[in-house]
Image (spheres, rainbow, N blue to C red):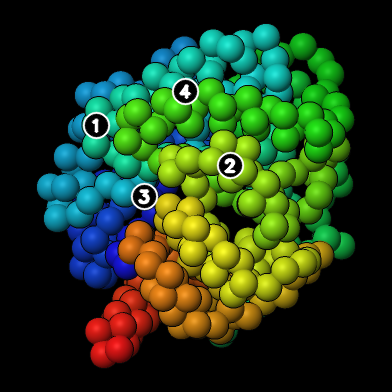
Amino acid sequence: MKLGLGLYRRMLTAENFRFARQAGATHIVAHLVDYFNSADSLSTATAGDAWGITTNQNRLWTTDELLSLRRAVEAEGLQLAAVENFDPAHWYDVLLNGPAKAQQLENLKTMIRRMGQAGIPCMGYNFSIAGVWGRITTHAARGGAPSVGFVAADAPPQTPIPNGQVWNMIYRPDAPPGVVGQVTPEQLWQRLADFLRALVPVAEEAGVRLAAHPDDPPLSTVRNTARLVYQPQLYQKLLDIVPSPANGLEFCLGTLAEMSEGDIYEAIDQYSRQGKICYVHARNVRGKVPTYHEVFIDEGDIDMLRALRILRRNGFDGVIIPDHTPQMSCVAPWHAGMAFALGYLKALISVVEREQADD
């Protein structure tokens, strides 16, 4: 197993790559979507991107840009394990079944081919219209550290999603008045099937794995739109649509543990035995829907050592990243929280690998 770090778009810098390496990571998972500046990021380049990627509604990532990012990561002694999440501007009508769907599917195929040409082996995605929704900041982690959670009673009203928005991001600021409206489970599963049937063969040829993230919060419906993977067994339904090594999972332990049904350890065993886990988000939580809190990696409901032992027993040799973590009271709250999580995971990986060697 390999230790990695996920970095948001504006954090993809040489300094943060060095931080990851110093903390023991060997791999990077890169987010190229500018979640924190959504309206602008869909129409203008972000200044200061040394490795060259720009996000534009009418522009796709190029092979040269992806290669530049990979080389910047490798220059600091790391490997680029995956890109995580398509920009909503690139696939909103794939999600909404809109008039640009066919062209956007072709564009996604082009980007997958370019990822293969650039030597990037995995593309994480979250097939969701409402996206991550309803999180609140809490102080439930040890020592009152600030972190995020979900408390249904304190969540915002589930207002309809306005036109021009998916995934809490605006892809069309001048969209006509109105709302997305109801999306049923049958409709969303059909849209996912269309996506997988179009992209999986291309991904196979390109040597890229598609990795699906489960829904967070794991509710059956959010803002009048259905969710896909809100119980562990629904991952199997997704995999069975197009059986292929290229159809895999972005396996988020925290999200799976939050789900109202199933056993986290059984889910880890089921999907790792099939070789379907592309990479792992390792974060810990306390509680399940409708109330849960993200906490430090060593204090939640998940026994991380037990989880990693199952992964190792079933031959998983991919990348594990800390995902979110509570922030710590110091001059660098995010870095301190991540350094703690990385160190803890590195120690656990060493333990399970030593155990295997001794067997």
Q: Residue at x 29, y 39 (%)?
A: 120
Which of the two labelled residues, at mark 3 and mark 1, occupies the earlier sequence position?
A: 3
Q: Nearer the viewer, residue 357 or 342?
A: 357
Work out how far the residue at label 3 is from the one at label 1, CA to CA, in angstroms.
15 Å
Which of the two labelled residues, at mark 1 and mark 2, occupies the earlier sequence position?
A: 1
Q: Nearer the viewer, residue 175 or 109?
A: 109
Which of the two labelled residues, at mark 2 and mark 3, occupies the earlier sequence position?
A: 3
Which mark's residue is nearer the viewer, 4 or 3? 4
Do the residues under discs 3 and 1 have CB atoms within 8 angstroms?
Answer: no
Q: Nearer the viewer, residue 243 or 179?
A: 243
Work out how far the residue at label 2 is from the one at label 3, CA to CA, in angstroms.
15 Å
Q: Is residue 358 left or right of residue 304?
A: left
Q: Residues within 10 Å of mark 1 (few under 14, many from 20)?
A: some
Helix, strand or loop at label 1? It is loop
Work out how far the residue at label 1 is from the one at label 2, CA to CA, in angstroms.
22 Å
Do the residues under discs 4 and 1 have CB atoms within 8 angstroms?
Answer: no
Q: Residues within 10 Å of mark 2 (few under 14, many from 20)?
A: many
Which mark's residue is nearer the viewer, 3 or 1? 1
Q: Amino acid at mark 4?
A: Leu
Q: Which mark is residue 29?
A: 3
Helix, strand or loop at label 3? It is strand
Helix, strand or loop at label 2? It is loop
Helix, strand or loop at label 4? It is helix
Compared with 260, 144 (above or below) is: below
Q: Can the viewer see residue 193 in this picture? A: yes
Q: Residues within 10 Å of mark 4 (few under 14, many from 20)?
A: many
Q: Residue at x 15, y 53 (%)?
A: 76
Q: Which residue is mark 1?
A: 118
Q: Which mark is residue 108?
A: 4
Q: Which mark is residue 126?
A: 2
Which of the two labelled residues, at mark 2 and mark 4, occupies the earlier sequence position?
A: 4
Q: Is residue 278 left or right of residue 261?
A: left
